[in-house]
Image (cartoon, rainbow, N blue to C red):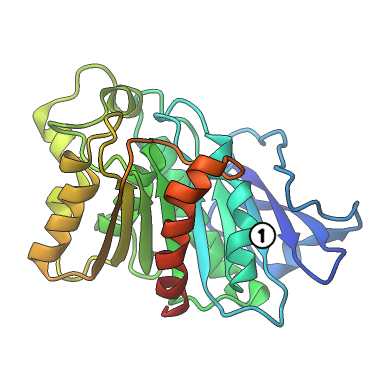
């Protein structure tokens, strides 16, 4: 993978700074980082920029140093593997930064039938966080992943696969209304975009995360609306929780009343029914890390 572009937002007092760094695949050092003064950070603003060809695209939001607890979360937005949902990206940064947690939004390459593209971006992102851990005040044993919908599949794959080296494997996973399986009960649009129109049974099993759980699978926090129909909980979020339980791995299960797939900050109904109860359980779980 070629050089990539990362925007780093450092939450420091009222006037954070923006850093832009060009990084080569998994190799990145503090020496590569250049500082530049910009406008004051608007916490409501989502940032966008042009992706360098063949490079990983990621936004990193660091908390104030006095709040920092050394935990980092790399988030993968949903979008059926055909887009990146904006309501599942930078809008979450204030929540995590207020808890003292570094937060990143990985705008993984859309696969168009080639799973190696987003998987490669995830591997690169985890490697960058490990390389930059000292600079960003992150504990290398407290780097986790978060995923929404199809992004939940990518995050969960990173946590369950044996393909990643042990030094970059996520230490925990947060899965919100996730796609988990690529087999029976999957979200067909996500599977078609991820693997192509006609995958073999062997390929579907390879990328069905519920089949690869073991006692060593990183701890998970799983939540979804009980009655949603876009991504079947029975075949996805609930099935993964059951697999974790059977394997003896640590998992928290939070099914919520309702039928909504996709929860938006700023929507009063979504805040009350989904986001507030989610954060009420997720916050102490994160602090326990």
Residue 46 found in image quarter? top right
Q: Nearer the viewer, residue 162 or 262?
A: 262
Counting from the top left corner in percent of width and height, residue 172 is at 36, 66
Neighbours of disc 1 within 10 Å: few (<14), some (14-19), many (20+):
many
Q: Nearer the viewer, residue 254 or 198?
A: 254
Counting from the top left corner in percent of width and height, residue 87 is at 56, 39
One can see residue 133 in this view: yes
Residue 149 found in image quarter? top left
Counting from the top left corner in percent of width and height, residue 206 is at 18, 41
One can see residue 107 in this view: no
Residue drawn at x 33%, y 28% as measured from the top left: 190
Residue 286 lies left or right of residue 106; in this view the side is: left
Q: Secondary structure at mark 1?
A: strand
The vertical placement of 96 against 55, above or below, is below
Residue 249 lies left or right of residue 271; in this view the side is: left
User: Most extreme residue toward the bottom, as rendered?
Assistant: 66
Residue 5 lies left or right of residue 250; in this view the side is: right
Residue drawn at x 40%, y 72% as measured from the top left: 285
User: Most extreme residue toward the top, as rendered?
Assistant: 197
Residue drawn at x 55%, y 60% as measured from the top left: 128
Q: Label 1, on which residue?
A: 61
Quarter in which the C terminus is drawn:
bottom left
Number of marks drawn: 1
Residue drawn at x 57%, y 49% as measured from the top left: 105
Q: Nearer the viewer, residue 19 or 74?
A: 74
């Amino acid at each position: 993978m070629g050089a990539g572009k990362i925007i780093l937002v450092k939450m420091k007092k009222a006037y954070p700074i923006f850093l832009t760094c060009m990084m080569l695949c998994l190799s990145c050092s503090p020496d590569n980082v250049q500082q530049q003064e910009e406008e004051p950070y608007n916490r409501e603003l989502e940032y966008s920029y042009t992706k360098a060809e063949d490079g990983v695209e990621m936004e990193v939001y660091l908390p104030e140093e006095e709040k920092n607890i050394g935990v980092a979360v790399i988030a993968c937005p949903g979008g059926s593997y055909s887009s990146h949902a904006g309501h599942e990206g930078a809008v979450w940064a204030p929540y995590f930064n207020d808890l003292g947690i570094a937060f990143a939004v990985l705008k993984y390459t859309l696969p168009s039938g080639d799973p190696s593209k987003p998987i490669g971006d995830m591997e690169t992102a985890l490697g960058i966080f490990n390389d930059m851990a000292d600079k960003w005040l992150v504990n290398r044993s407290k780097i986790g992943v978060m995923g929404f919908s199809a992004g939940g599949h990518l995050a969960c794959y990173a946590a369950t696969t044996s393909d990643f080296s042990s030094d970059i494997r996520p230490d925990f996973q947060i899965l919100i209304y996730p796609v988990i399986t690529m087999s029976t009960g999957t979200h067909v649009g996500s599977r078609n975009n991820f693997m192509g129109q006609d995958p073999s049974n062997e390929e579907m099993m390879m990328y069905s995360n519920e089949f690869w759980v073991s006692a060593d699978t990183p701890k998970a926090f799983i939540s979804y609306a009980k009655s949603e129909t876009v991504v079947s909980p029975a075949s996805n979020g609930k099935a993964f929780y059951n697999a974790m339980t059977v394997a003896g791995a640590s998992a928290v299960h939070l099914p919520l009343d309702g039928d909504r797939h996709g929860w938006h900050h700023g929507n009063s109904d979504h805040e009350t029914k989904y986001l507030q109860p989610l954060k009420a359980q997720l916050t102490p779980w994160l602090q326990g890390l």
